[in-house]
Amino acid sequence: IRWEAYYNELKTYAAQNGNTLVPQKYEPNPKLGYWVMQQRRQYSLQQESNGPKKRSSFNGIEGERRRQLLEDIGFVWRVGRRGPIGAC
């Protein structure tokens, strides 16, 4: 499935649940939970400032567009076991 297809699934999830906090083991669609986890991982790689720039799917023009699309729907980039980190 293409990135846009998962993005659209995430938008549907957000509309139904009021957030983008898809559980990693989301029973109705386990692949969506994995995809969301991967988006957070790619963001984390991009944000690391120590040493050489890491390879991330958010690097470049297309990556920036995707990151912005996620931010536009309120994507939470960092979560812990108890929910979003730094969201207070």
Image (cartoon, rainbow, N blue to C red):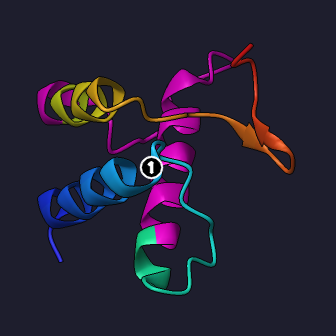
Residue found at x 46% / y 53%:
17
Q: In the picture shown, does residue 11 fall above or below 47?
A: below
Residue 58 in the image: state x and y as whole percent: 32, 35
Stretch in magenta: 33-62
Q: Could you say which quadrant of the image residue 4 lies in?
A: bottom left
Callout 1: SS: helix
Residue 30 in the image: state x and y as whole percent: 49, 83
Residue found at x 69% / y 19%:
87
Is residue 4 rendered magenta in the image?
no
Residue found at x 40% / y 29%:
74
Q: In the picture shown, does residue 71 fall above or below 17?
A: above
Quadrant in the picture for the N terminus? bottom left
Residue 68 in the image: state x and y as whole percent: 25, 24
- On the rendered structure, is 34 left or right of 78? left
Residue 80 in the image: state x and y as whole percent: 81, 43
- On the rendered structure, is 40 left or right of 69? right
Q: In the rendered structure, which amino acid carries the disc numbered 1?
A: Gln
For label 1, the residue is 39
Q: Could you say which quadrant of the image residue 88 lies in?
A: top right
- On the rendered structure, is 36 left or right of 37? left
Is residue 48 rendered magenta in the image?
yes
Q: In the picture shown, does residue 41 fall above or below 45?
A: below
